[in-house]
Image (cartoon, grey):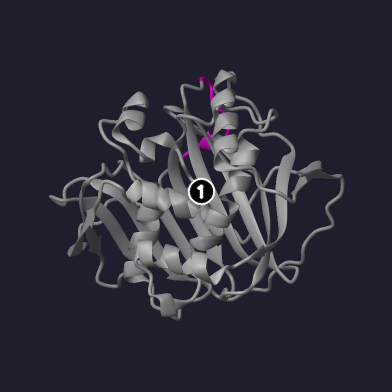
């Protein structure tokens, strides 16, 4: 995520020739079977495909949001957490990344970073249109970094955008400009809190998020993918840290997280932040190894864009 991205008002996305309208979400089991089948894909560098997935009339459900808020530490009176639309879009991410046209195998991907821009307050009962498509490629010394871009619209206006950056290791001669971290170590952070991460936290989060990646669930399934114990979802860690720093009335948000090392379950983590609370880290119990680095800030309100006229729609039912 190059340093100049913060100053650009728009997100680069691959021009789309085919947008698939999703009217029915496949089960998590079906999606992970698709992910398993994608493991046969080539590891060579390729351009991102011209496809996207859209789901309309997605409700912000009060009960689901309340369960999510409790698990991640958000105040229920604080409204809709800014990370919630990412969870609503996650099945579309999986549909995109397991599509036959998508060039990389999904299993074994490394979640590098997430950028969220929330342009307006979200409220329980809102209905959103979610659009997921491919974004820029970046070269990495360990393989290929690619971007999945999510846009949420309410009443035809953009209210939320997200960029998820993933690393597909083992890809030779990767495409794009070099990937660069934006968040460096911060010497002035002080320890603010310590949190336990219980053994079943990954299963709790999976039931809410629909992300049943086996590395998060059980010791045996985690060991099959090279982890000594299950690891918690990176987006839980991001949400938990945001819950500790964001003021309840914050809008027009610009949020960034970079994932550094996995959090093993069970265990303990420590939360560190700067005096202005805009920079923060999640570290191990000793406070020496960073699990993630993040920052939040507000940006000036801007006019939101109308939904473009998308043609060549395909139904996925």
Quick one: which residue is furthest to the right in this view?
A: 312
Q: Position of residue 172 (x, y in %)?
A: 51, 20
Can you say which quadrant of the picture contains the C terminus?
Answer: top right
In the image, residue 34 sits, relative to residue 316, either above or below, namely above
The residue drawn where x is 48% and y is 76% is 79
Q: Is residue 132 left or right of residue 107?
A: right
Position of residue 19 measured from the top left corner of the image (x, y, whole percent): 78, 45
Residue 3, visible in the rendered structure? no
- Give the prevailing secondary structure in the magenta stretch: loop
Q: Quick one: 207 or 231, which is closer to the camera?
A: 207
Residue 172: tell me if it is visible: yes
Please tell me which residue is depicted at 57% across the width and 68% down the height of the picture. Answer: 61
Question: Which sits in the foreground, 254 or 282?
Answer: 282
The residue carrying mark 1 is: 210
Q: Is residue 143 left or right of residue 242?
A: right
Residue closest to the eye, 265 or 309 = 265
Vertically, is 76 above or below 68? Answer: below
Q: Position of residue 98 (x, y in %)?
A: 62, 33
What number of labels is visible? Answer: 1
Q: Position of residue 169 (x, y in %)?
A: 45, 26
Q: Is residue 153 left or right of residue 204?
A: right
Which range is magenta?
172-179
239 magenta-colored: no
Answer with the quarter of the image where residue 102 lies.
top right
Q: Name which residue lies at 43% across and 65% down.
A: 67
């Amino acid at each position: 995520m190059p340093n100049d991205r913060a100053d650009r008002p728009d997100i680069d996305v691959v021009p789309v020739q085919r947008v698939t309208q999703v009217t029915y979400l496949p089960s998590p089991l079906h999606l992970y079977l698709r992910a398993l089948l994608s493991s046969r894909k080539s590891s060579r560098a390729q351009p991102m495909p011209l496809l996207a997935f859209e789901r309309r009339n997605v409700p912000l459900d009060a009960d689901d949001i309340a369960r999510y808020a409790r698990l991640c530490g958000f105040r229920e009176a604080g409204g809709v957490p800014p990370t919630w639309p990412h969870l609503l879009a996650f099945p579309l991410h999986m549909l995109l990344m397991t599509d036959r046209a998508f060039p990389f195998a999904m299993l074994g991907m490394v979640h590098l970073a997430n950028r969220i821009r929330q342009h307006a307050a979200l409220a329980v009962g809102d209905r959103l249109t979610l659009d997921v498509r491919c974004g820029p490629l970046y070269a990495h010394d360990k393989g290929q970094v690619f971007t999945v871009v999510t846009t949420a619209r309410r009443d035809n206006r953009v209210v939320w955008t997200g960029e998820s950056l993933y690393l597909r290791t083992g890809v030779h001669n990767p495409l794009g400009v070099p990937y660069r971290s934006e968040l460096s170590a911060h010497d002035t952070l002080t320890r603010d809190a310590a949190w336990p991460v219980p053994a079943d936290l990954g299963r709790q989060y999976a039931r809410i998020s629909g992300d049943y990646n086996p590395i998060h669930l059980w010791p045996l399934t985690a060991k099959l993918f090279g982890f000594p114990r299950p690891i918690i979802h990176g987006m839980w860690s991001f949400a938990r840290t945001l819950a500790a720093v964001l003021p309840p009335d914050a809008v027009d948000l610009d949020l960034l997280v970079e994932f550094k090392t996995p959090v093993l379950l069970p265990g303990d983590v420590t939360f560190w932040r700067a005096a202005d609370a805009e920079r923060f880290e999640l570290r191990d119990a000793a406070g020496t190894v960073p699990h993630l680095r993040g920052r939040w800030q507000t940006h000036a309100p801007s006019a939101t864009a109308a939904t473009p006229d998308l043609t060549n729609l395909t139904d996925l039912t």
